[in-house]
Image (cartoon, rainbow, N blue to C red):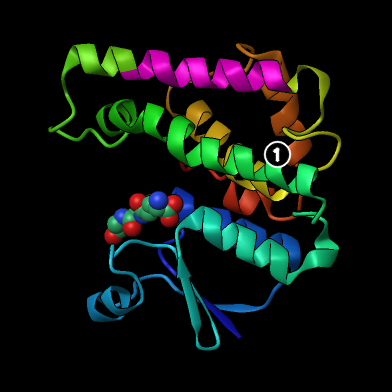
Amino acid sequence: MMTLLGRSTSINVRKILWCLDILECPFQHIEQPDVQTLATLNPNRLVPVLTDGDFSLWESNAILRYLARRFPDSDLYPSTPTVRSLIDQWLDWQLAEFNSAWVYAFQARVRNNPDFQNADLIEQSVRNWNDKVALLNDQLADKDFVTGAQFRVCDIALALSVNRWYESIGQIGRFAHIDAYFRRCAAQKGFTDWVANGVA
Ligand SMILES: N[C@@H](CCC(=O)N[C@@H](CS)C(=O)NCC(=O)O)C(=O)O
């Protein structure tokens, strides 16, 4: 039986909860792992961590890839090199570019973190964040999902990122293709539990 460590309010943990739900994969969930257990499993002391027997893995998008490989019939991560590489491209972009764009504004606006209150940096982060959503909107102009006609594992990470934008600084009506994409993602099992559940 797999075990997932990490609180279900975390966007990165929700990626895994949603993926496990789509895959209908039974698992145990430890919301609040003890500090020592977490440090043993992940030197960064961050969640999510997934264990599968003696194997353990951290980094949310690496866990998504692992689960999608474990359940090849799901078609979340086809082995065709071109298809798989595009999925990888968007998973990497989500963590390296999209995620980095929102960090400052999210800490300021949603977390009300006193260490993130520089007005210029907030404005810059809001602009970058909106630019990333605009880029994704353009990508979706002629496709149902980010790599084509099918929902893939990268759409798990991206739909959660779009939800964070809606819940923080975004609004329905600003980007038509994003709105349509989000509605299409809603057809996936578990969407209202793990994605559009009112949590940024
Ligand atoms: N790049 C990592 C980031 C992990 C991360 O920042 N996790 C946050 C929650 S989203 C965390 O563990 N924060 C400390 C805590 O929740 O105690 C990933 O994608 O898994």
Residue located 30% across and 79% down the image: 40
Which contiguous range is marked in magenta?
125-139
Q: Is residue 191 left or right of residue 61?
A: right
Tell me if residue 126 is in the magenta stretch: yes
Residue found 62% across the figure and 65% down from its top:
66
Looking at the picture, tell me which residue is in the foreground, 67 or 187. 67
Residue 100 visible to an observer of this rendering? yes
Question: Is disc 1 placed on a helix, strand or loop?
Answer: helix
Disc 1 packing (10 Å; few <14; some 14–19; many ≥20)? some
Q: What amino acid type should be assigned to the residue bearing mark 1?
A: Leu
Ligand 1: which quarter? bottom left
Q: Is residue 192 magenta?
A: no
Task: Please tell me which residue lies in front, 69 or 5.
Answer: 69
Q: Is residue 122 above or below residue 75?
A: above
Extreme residue in the front direction: 81
Furthest residue toward left: 115
Residue 34: x and y, percent? 28, 78
> Looking at the image, which residue is at 30% across and 81% down?
37
Q: How far across and down, in percent of the image, does residue 154 sit?
A: 65, 44
User: Where residue 157 sits in the image (x, y, percent)?
Assistant: 58, 44
Res. 129 image quadrant: top left
Instruction: Write down the residue under mark 1.
Output: 86
Estimate the x, y position of residue 199 in percent, counting from the top left. 47, 43
